[in-house]
Amino acid sequence: MAEGSIAGVAAGLAAEDRIAVASNWKLVWWRFKRHHLALFCAGLLIALYMIVLCPDFFSTQNPETTDARQAFIPVQSVHLFDDGKFSPWVPAIVGKRHPVTLRMEWQADPSRKVPVRFFTPGPVYQVFGLFESRLHLIGPADPTQRIFLLGSDRLGRDQWSRIMHGTQTSMTVGLVAVALSVILGVVLGGLSGYLGGKTDQVIQRVIELLQSVPTIPIWLALSAALPRDWTPIQVFFAITVILSLVGWTTLGREVRGRFLALREEDFVLAARLAGCSRMRIILRHMVPTFLSHIIATSSLAIPVMIINETSLSFLGLGIRPPAISWGVLLQEAQNIQTLALAPWLLIPGVVVIVAVLAFNLVGDGLRDAADPYSG
Amino acid sequence: MTRYITQRLLLLPFLLLIYSFVIFVVIQAPPGDFLTSYVATLSASGSSMSAEQIQALRHSYGLDQPFVVQYGLWLKNLLQGDLGLSLEYQRPSADLISEQLGLTLALALFSFVLTWAIAVPAGIYSATHPRSIIDHVLTVVNYVGVATPNFMLALILMWAAFAYFDISVTGLFSPDFVDAPWSIARVLDLLAHIWLPALVLGIAGTARLSRIMRANLLDELNKPYVVTARAKGMKEWRLVLRYPVRLALNPLISTIGWYLPALFSGSLIVATVMNLPNIGPLLLRALINRDMYLAGGILLIYSFLTIVGTLLSDILLALVDPRIRVEN
């Protein structure tokens, strides 16, 4: 018993030592790890960004392939086992024309199985524009066949593959827009807090003006002002700039507050006496002390950007077809008749909700972990 | 107090002037003008216009003037209460806007009232019963509510109502009342329809406010004055409502400043999806058709509402919390 308690005390001391010498980032990581939900969501986000890196690998076919004879095909869910053996398949879809409306009505027929394979060759695609590949995560065993894991839209395009490509656009918009906001927020907020005086006054008034702007109407007006003949890439960057134009203000304020508090600290004075340039003091000495806060705040800003992009594109003033984003996909679900006929067109919206939830939970976990010395 | 309010009111015209310039730049920015898109629509439908006709029209609308002159003209008319002619509808923009403005305000304000009516009691309940089932349910609703885009919620509700109950939940009136003159029956019909879009619009705000209320109240409930009152034998619900709730409400009131304006501009998306009479869809159409005076007028109205919303909340906060009453 006595030995056990001594060992326990020793272990406790060792743990204390570990904490005492751990770097700031290690402490943040240890605290973050305690949030199991946040950790799970972080995994989910990593998976989503894998899709961003190479959406074609996860697709089953080209997202632009249209076929009017295969419009509004319902979801073909994947079954992993056949007769107790591992042999994945999806039910075949059989169509019948409705005698009155003459519309094709599709029925899943579980008795006719279409075998599917994992890591199977399919349509050729480019990886990072560098080399070609035929490998897909999942695809029909017979490459000439088409399967619709999440159904098809009014033009017979495969929704699963389109969601994979939409993920690439929408997740990137969020990331790039927040990156721009962070740069603007840190530089302008930093200058405002560090220089004070007139600069501070001007930047603060600009922030107040931007924050009292009716955001959604102004975003719409700005997006409507983009020339119609721009390429999807140009539109994409313009939209991210528009979104970050308002987004940086919150961060700018926060950074300014931090700078005001830090300006009088001894280490800043020491750096100034040592002859560091202004930019070096800001970027090398001051920013690292609240970097974890910036990261936590920006991870909470990404989902807001994603929702905004989705809403803009949904209204037809954001990312424009032929580019694919979650909002563009949801445009297909705009009227109630289509929805009643093909409710699976709402699935991209579910993806949006899951992604935003994941970002929010990870952001909350990071925010709690960002200050490892409290609590 | 009066001085503070007058100061803020005096600032209002300057802010509007800055906004009017920014708005004019934005609506003027795209290449081409209303006539370009009008001619494109005409040629798409098979008819056409001669170059002289287009030039004459452009001249009569003042679209051939330099930017500064156009802005000056617009501003001059604005000061006389004239928002300009809607080129698409060939009617004064002010008329088009005022037709929809009442219902736009009604939706935002109703949504605001609904939000508070749900959020405050929910927050009080979860603070006094922490870790109860309802508290956990509210936590989940909070996360999902904040993560769901407004239009998505509207789409899901519309689809569910259509697919399972075979009813249409679009619009703010039953078909009989759409064009009817105002009467008690019409108001009742409006109330029967407005709560759903108002709820859709306010769900994220409701979730967030109830969480703020819960956190504030939990902080207050541990304070000594609550223990004292309890020790003196005060009835629990009376005690909670009388002191800590009042204190916990203050930070909530300071959120009105961004929440009310957010409701005005957020109603744009919900109104477009649910097909409501609102200046939002009108703006969307005007922007797409390059109907610049109508778009500019609506953007100005939105800016005005945003500034007034912020001002109202600042005044309210100063009234409720003596510590904030600005003397400096």
Image: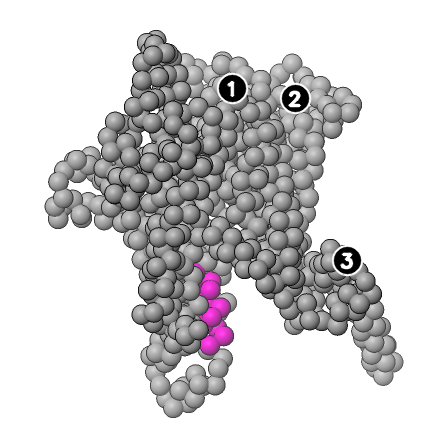
**Label 3 crowding class (10 Å Cα cut-off): few <14, some 14-19, many 20+?**
few
Residue at image x 63%, y 66%?
A260
Question: Given the image, on which type of amino acid does mark 1 rest?
Answer: Gly
Residue under circle 2? Answer: A140
Residue A268 inside the magenta-drawn segment: no
Residue at image x 24%, y 33%?
B92
Are tags 2 and 1 found on a single chain? yes
Is the Cβ of the residue at disc 2 closer than 8 Å to that at disc 3? no
Residue under circle 1? Answer: A156
Question: Given the image, on which type of amino acid does mark 3 rest?
Answer: Ser
**Label 1 crowding class (10 Å Cα cut-off): few <14, some 14-19, many 20+?**
many
Question: Given the image, on which type of amino acid does mark 2 rest?
Answer: Pro
Tag of residue A277: 3
Indicate the secondary structure of the residue bearing disc 2: strand
Indicate the secondary structure of the residue bearing disc 3: loop
Q: Position of residue A341 (x, y in %)?
A: 40, 26
